[in-house]
Amino acid sequence: MTDQAQLLPGTLDLLILKAVSLGPLHGYGILLRIGQISGSALLIEQGALYPALFRLVRQGLLTSDWGTSENNRRAKFYELTPDGRKRLQEETEGWNRLASAMTSVLGAQPEEV
Amino acid sequence: MNLGGYLRSLAHKFFHRSAIADDLDEELRSHIEHRADDMERSGMNRAEAQRQARIEFGARERFKEESFEALGGDFLNTVWRDVRFALRVLRKSKGFAFAAIVTLALAIGANAVVYGVMDALILRPLRVPQAGSLWGLENGDGSGWQSYPNYRDFRERNHTFDDLAAIRMEFAALDMGSDPDQATGWSTSGNYFDELRIQPFLGRLFHPQDEKGLNSAPYLVLSYPYWHSRFQDDRGVVGRTILVNKHPFTIIGVTPPEFRGTLAFIAPDFFIPIIEDVDGENILNTRSINNREVFEILGHLKPGVTPAQATADLNAIGAYLEKTYPKEVDHKNYTLGRPGLFVFSRPAQAFVGGLMLLAGLILLAACANLGSLFAAHAADRSREVALRLALGSSRQRILRQLLTEAVVISLAGGALGLAGSVALLRKLAGWQPFPGAPIHLPISPDTRLYVVALVLALVSGFLFGIVPIRQVLRTNPYEIVKAGPVGQFGRRLTARDVLLVVQIAICAVLVTSSFVAVRGLERGLHSNFGFEPHNTMLAGTNLAMSGYRPDSWIPTQRRIIDAMRTIPGVERVALVNNFAPLIYAAGNTENVFKDETRERSQSHVASMSFRFEVSPEYFEAAGTTLLEGRDITWHDDKSAPPVAVVNREFAHRIFGSVPQAIGKYYRMQDGTRVQVVGVVEDGKYMSLTETQNAAMFLPFLLSPASQTQVLVRSRRDPEQLASAIRNKIRELDSGLPTDIETWTNMMEVVMFPARVATMALGILGLMGAILSITGIFGMAAYSVSKRLKELGIRMALGAQRREVLGAALGRSVKLLAAGSTAGLVLGVLASRVLASIVYQATPRDPLVLAGVVAAMLLLGLLATWIPAQRALTVNPLLLLRED
């Protein structure tokens, strides 16, 4: 557990959008996908996923539809809307800018200043 | 998302709540199944996998709740669910809900009734166009009377009013050929309707150009209600002739339905021009200070003129009039007042304001009561609250739930109280407190009343709803679930204790005030009026109504007196001009001067004195004690020198003492020299609350009046006597309307304010008593129920009944004592407020103090009786076995 990073506030939405952008997923699938692509480095409390999903649906970034999962169970699948795709792109760019800025700040050496 | 779509989704969510809930449930279940599938694949058995998956998922209810909220528009849903839950909870604790709703219904109902009356009498402007700029002239002494010539001067000399109109009362017989009717009308200046901007409903109204001197405009305008009830909406009455006191008038029109004149409590039946003389009194030329014939002067201010400017303007005219007519005009500082209540506005405002304050106190006491009930209720539910907290509910949700319960109760109570008060107000609106007196309360419950009740309900709901909040916020779920609710009954003063003390203090104030009021009324009823109203019948006639000429008035009145004497069982008969003391506007006043005073201007007045004109034997018929000298006789007529009987106060003021007064002289305003031949005891003349006034009784033979009352003293049954009197008068003149009532009944009008005040305060006091019973009972019952186990142990260990009682109820009794003492002290301090409402109110009355203490003790005893019984019948064995 200790090597799993705490989520920064506000990053859960971005993670969900990214996960869903790779193809329609149901709730549990989204958790698995995030775990898989982050190498299990990011911890998401399972229940906390759903309020976030509903919020994104309400904002019109995701749509949902019932379907059948790979386990042959009924599940609700989420898909990115065009608005959602645009938002993902913006948020990704914003994140990258922040990340590179943070990286360069944290990587600064005494002689570079 | 656009707004329309959002609203649609909101509505969709609201009405399809259960569909969404099912959807969400299924989705979460599907999630857990998928997780369990994975775990099963890694070798767990299915049941264990499902259990594990559920644990991993976390607080499902909380996430469900948050998901709902994330969906947006969930506020309504939450509220709706809270309301339904609240209803379920309340259904489970019916007694609690019932007590709370009834308490609130009473408190809010009382407030709504008082507000309704206040709205009708004080807050609401008159229903005339541009009521905002309409003002009436008030004399500095709290009255509004003026003589007609003074009115003319005010109208012509002012620079600040559009115009000034004048009104006076006219009680007259209306006759259209059959079935004559006594009606109340106003005679008004010709410009009255124009100044008020009133348009006719039918026909036309009269105007200034109709006035061409005395009796030049015999036109009569009907009010809509009178036209409706008496003429059944017959449009044909316009143009027809009607007799007013036998004088022919032409009906020219009807005023619109919403117009009820310019007084809040007397609605006129008809209007005639003020220049018409229908009662044998030509008021147009007499400026004398005693000729106070114009009841009120009113008008619209010119645009841009402030009331202060208008007041200065009127006072300048007053000063001019006093200088020009020093004998006739007495100028006090004039002020402007809102027409409607007019000179009654200050006492009415004080009274209604005082009632509103007390009603507010009732509501506050009810809130304190419900607050402690709620806190107790919440404490009893601490296990439920703890469970919900443990299951992941947020404290905010729980508080919202508790507040919802409070608001549901307060709305139910408010609705009930409002319904009751609307019924009561409707009754009040149709109420005729005195037969024959045209009192009309313009009460109509409307939206404002509903809004006030709603706001009061919501505010009180929040007030008592927030009491348990601290308690909930402090709840530690794990402790309570483990150990069960533990009552904290240390010596610490809890919020609940404070609330109870506050509540009882307020109730004690109310109980004190109602005791003070009842005592005041009792004293008023049994105080010395200076006459004995019991066993006396008053027969009022107005000879002008039957068309008698002034020179035939006195002979006719003598015939009436003689006829009364022939009725068997009648002991004394006498007559008084206008009205007997304490009847309606009995008080004619006049300035008197010392004999040696040569200049009779207002600055040399020796005393203002009530003036009654009476027949011989009046004092015996009225039961007034003659202290010294002689009665008025039939020889004191126009051929004899003028004499008077005065009261003790008069004798003291003018002559120094009673014996010194006999045979001495004083002078009237017009210079007449009057000899005092007798002195009678002091009395009340116009109102019960007046300070002792001087009074003089003059022979009626000297001043003929068409309006008189005959006093008939007899021990016979009043109804038989009344019909005998009526028959005798009919024998003399079958067409003369006669008004026969006992003196005591006629005095109801004077007693009315005191009675109403006492009734209102009595009801509020009773409500205070009920509230203190429920408050103490709730507290005592609760503390006994919480400590039953402890009491059981005490009893098992051998405690005596007294010790058990002390332990169970000591605290309640102490709080009761503290609250009552505080309330009693406050009640005594509030004596000033009460004194303005209630006649002879003095809380420094040992009987009142003892009464309040006894009442509070009794209430306390009553309220703790059942809990005490319960504490004493505890069966320790049974109790300790439980849990």
Image (tube, rainbow, N blue to C red):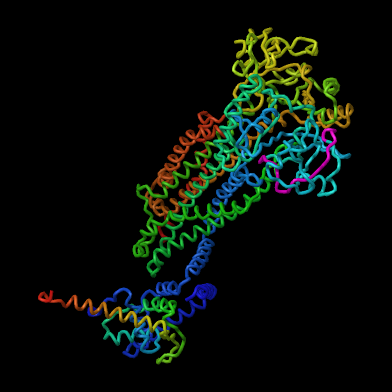
Return the residue nearer the eye: B642 or B360: B642
Is residue B343 at all visible to an observer of this figure? no
Residue B822 as seen in the image, left or right of residue B266: left
Q: Position of residue B794 (x, y in %)?
A: 38, 50
Percent x, y of residue B2: 49, 75
Residue B246, quarter of the rendered image = top right
Asked if the stretch drawn in magenta spans residue B318, the answer is no
The C terminus of chain B lies in which quarter of the figure?
bottom left
Q: Which residues are magenta?
A: B244-264
Q: Residue at x 51, y 45 (%)?
A: B863
Reply above or below: B188 against B632. Answer: below
Count of numbered labels shown in the rendering: 0
Whether residue B576 is visible: yes
Horizontal side of residue B547 vs B783, given as left or right: right
Which of the 4 quarters of the picture holds residue B359?
top right
**Which residue appears at 85% of the width and 36% of the height?**
B248
Name the quadrant containing residue A69: bottom left
Q: Position of residue B731 (x, y in %)?
A: 89, 28
Instruction: Give the x, y percent position of residue B283.
Output: 74, 27
Compare residues B618 and B535 and report the one nearer the observer. B618
